[in-house]
Image: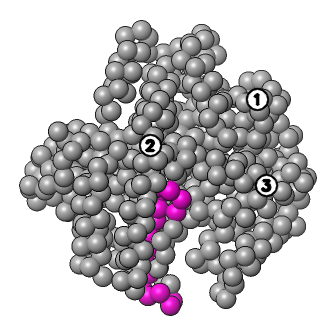
Amino acid sequence: MLKNALPKISTPLPGPNAKAIIDRRKDAMPGAIKCIYPCVINRGEGAMLEDVDGNIFLDWIGGVGVLNIGYSHPELIEAVKAQSEKYFHAMMNIITHEGYIKLAEKMNKIVPVKGEKRKTMFANSGAEADENAVKIAKSYTKRPNIIVFSGAFHGRTLLTACMTSKKAYANGIGPFPDGIYRADFPYLYRGPKGYTEQEMIAYYIDELHKAFEEASPAEYVAAIVVEPVQGEGGFVPAPIEWVKAVRQICDENGILLIADEVQTGFARSGKMFVSNYWEEAGCAPDIITTAKSIAGGVPLSAVTAREEIFDNVTAGIIGGTYGGNPLACASALKVIEIIERDNLCGRSMEIAKKCKDKFNEWNEKFDEVGDVRGIGCMMGIEFVTDKVSKTPNTKLVSSIVMYCAQNGLLVESAGIYSNVIRFLCPLVVTDEQLECGLQILESAIKACR
């Protein structure tokens, strides 16, 4: 079975069938939607995919965090099939369908936002969830501004592209919406030289206070939007002591704290959400946005907040044609059932330990490995030219990505300088597959350094 297979490359990449399709891609779709990987998927199971030439790849990208329960889980197929035989679509602004209600009820139980009584709405993508969360926060607080952070990625709509830090994602599409201000994120590996971790956290809190002085007074800020682990920014975790301080700042100033868990959610961190760790530390967010692995690959996203917030949103500003599509809701309910039943949070921590031990070994062995970080199974390896200068080694990472692909392992870069290898492997990967992937990645580092 493919789900138990190991990587096997039988043709030069791309193979002849893949090359023909990739050539058609160039003619049929915009080149601005880029893909560097020399394969075309034919089928996928678990953490493995087979391309149209019979080559088998181990996928450590997982649709950029979409496939936490893996490719084509048979129970997911049956759940979506059963729903498809009843009806494909029912718009919640027109006709109520129970799947939306069941999923909202489940999300209200498991999403750790501040407040006992919670409500959830659904949209189609992470960017839509983030945009709706901002609208909800503004409508509830009656304030115009939000604060986001350096290194942030929140999407590619006009609003979320402005919220996103890296302007390669927004080049030439302005003017942008007003009222979005940026503070420095606590990227401790690249924090002020000579500072202790405690001193760095204090420094970054001071930087947030500066945003109130230099950008928007606190009384005009509706929300502070944080990725608990920055994704595109380089898999940089928000230190819990910093989160506690941000929560206190929000409470003192009537500001909502929004956690963007689009990439971090659904067992990736060793808990259902990174915000579960926040909740345990007494700093749960007010609003959480989720997407990606929520429905195993069927487009769906969610915004969850306490009842008080949703009940004070102006009618008409949220909703949409496809939000909470019946097929997506059926899929999401089954995804959550599988995660809970099969203890994928526990499996995430098992995988994380094996990977972290190996990554830390590389950190000792290779001068080019500058930092290993993350929460649970959302980990990043930052590559530098040397440990002293910490100069980002973008060229090395680019070479590693291509070497791995040519040897049957799909990995992806991230970070401000594209010098981080991110780990987003499906949580259903076998131990043998995981070990094989670690061997390929180590060979890549040795060959490309």
Residue 371: image x %, image y %?
49, 75
Q: Which residue is mark 2?
A: 344
Q: Which kind of residue does numbered mark 1 sit on?
A: Lys
**Residue occupying the point 39% across, 40% down:** 69
Which mark, residue 247? Answer: 3
User: Are circles 3 and 1 on residues that touch, CB within 8 Å?
Assistant: no
Check the image and report above or below for 335 versus 363: above
Q: Which kind of residue does numbered mark 3 sit on?
A: Arg
In space, the residues marked 3 and 2 are separated at their CA atoms by 29 Å
- Does label 2 or label 1 sit earlier along the sequence? 1
Sort mark 3 into few (<14), some (14-19) or many (20+) by Cα contacts within 10 Å: many
Tag 1 secondary structure: loop
Sort mark 1 into few (<14), some (14-19) or many (20+) by Cα contacts within 10 Å: few
Residue 227 found in image quarter: bottom right
Residue 135 found in image quarter: top right
**Residue occupying the point 87% across, 40% down:** 142
Check the image and report above or below for 38 versus 261: below
Tag 2 secondary structure: helix
Q: Which residues are magenta?
A: 374-389
- Quadrant position of the N terminus in the picture: top left
Please give left or right for residue 46 compared with residue 153 in the image: left
Q: Which residue is mark 1?
A: 117
Residue 383 colored in magenta in the image: yes
Q: Nearer the viewer, mark 3 or mark 2?
A: 2
